[in-house]
Image: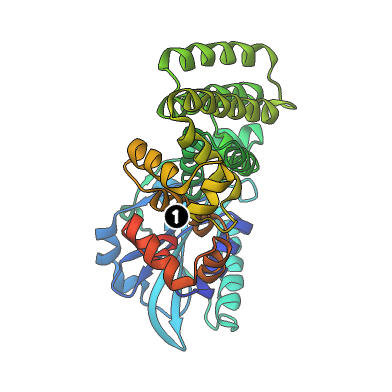
Amino acid sequence: MAQFNPQLSLMQQFSQLLNFSFCEFTANGQLVTQVQRDMAITLDLTQVKQQLALFKNTQPQLFAVNQWQLLILCLPKLSETHWNGFWLCFISLDAPNISHVNVDKDYAIKLATALYLALYHHSITTKVRLSPKLDALVINYSLRDLLLEELKTNEITHYRDMTDIYEREKILLAAITAGDLERALSLINQLLNIPEYIGMLSNDPLHRIRGFIIVTVVIVSRAANAGGVPAGESYFKGDKLIRKAEQAVDLDNYKDFTRQIVTYYTQLVQHYRQENLPTAVYQVEQYLQQHIYQPLTVAQVATALNYTSTNLSRIIKHATGSSLKQFILQRKVIEGRYLLQFSKRSIQEIATSLNFADASHFTRVFHQYTGMTPSKFRH
């Protein structure tokens, strides 16, 4: 399990609270963490290593980047009093509360003081000086124009690491493909509560959400295709939904409309899976979705669905290539992956909730079907 890093956690919290991007580097100039907010910074990592001597200081330093209207605050990473790396924090001069160089510097010094005190419980002992510019270090400040446009319209979006959103969306699409309506609705509700998920397709809020609906219909229809819905039907239904959205969707109802899209396509998958799969296979899939946290044995599942163990196992093996026992374990592993990614439960707690004998048993089965341990998958 990855070790908790309290300094990195503090930096992430300050970054979100005060809206600055930052990168974390090791003592030899290797980039290990990058957090982007309103500004997306791309650095020349070769230049970082070439300028390493500038950053080897146990006190904060302030650098100017004239080309991009940017300040770089360099904070040391200290182990006791020993320098073992550094953070580069990026402060935009386009921010609405910064107007000229004196204020820029004063603001950055206050930020440096606050961060240094929070990290090391000591105040800064030397005055932070504005060091020579490092224009060559920053090779791309890709959201500057977008940020300025948002400032004009008072619509500031806090860009953050989108990996979590992307992973949730992948599992949402997998749930639709599997016809798992309860899981799909749970995930779309989570995503709709994240402002960044809607995106910035337009500066006009109404156009933005209608654009979001179009994108949603497209990706959800593809997931439904993968679940067995004929492409012609899903595209035709999607076209109708998009036309309806253009007429009916507004700022008050777009979340409900999005849930209706997810529900509609997931139920369409259920319909076609029921038609195309052997009845027994579909029944087992539905039963496992609804009872995954209960004890599940071949005999128990067969009895619940009014089959003999031998007959049901033979049908599942013929249709899927897996034995019924393997089929059950595969579904438990899928649920385990979801819990590892989207809950804070320990591996032992997950193993218990899925009725494995212990964490070791869960780990062996998880590795068998995914090629990695639960700890590695989570981190």
- Residue 322 in sight in this render: yes
231 left or right, relative to 205: left
Q: Is residue 8 above or below residue 194?
A: below
Q: Quadrant of residue 306?
A: top right
Residue 362 is situated, as x and y percent measured from the top left of the image, at: 44, 66
Residue 36 is situated, as x and y percent measured from the top left of the image, at: 48, 52
Residue 290 is situated, as x and y percent measured from the top left of the image, at: 60, 45
- Taking the view exactly as shown, the residue that stands out farthest to the right is 252
Q: Specify few, some or many for label 1: CA neighbours under 10 Å numbering under 14, 14-19, or 20 or more.
A: many
Residue 170 is situated, as x and y percent measured from the top left of the image, at: 46, 41
In this figure, which residue is indicated by the disc labeled 1? Answer: 333
- Residue 202 in sight in this render: no
Q: Is residue 360 above or below residue 337?
A: below
The quadrant of the rendering that contains the C terminus is bottom left
- Taking the view exactly as shown, the residue that stands out farthest to the bottom is 80
Q: Residue at x 56, y 52 (%)?
A: 292
Callout 1, which amino acid? Val
Depth check, front residue: 224 or 31? 224
Q: Residue at x 47, y 88 (%)?
A: 80
The quadrant of the rendering that contains the N terminus is bottom left
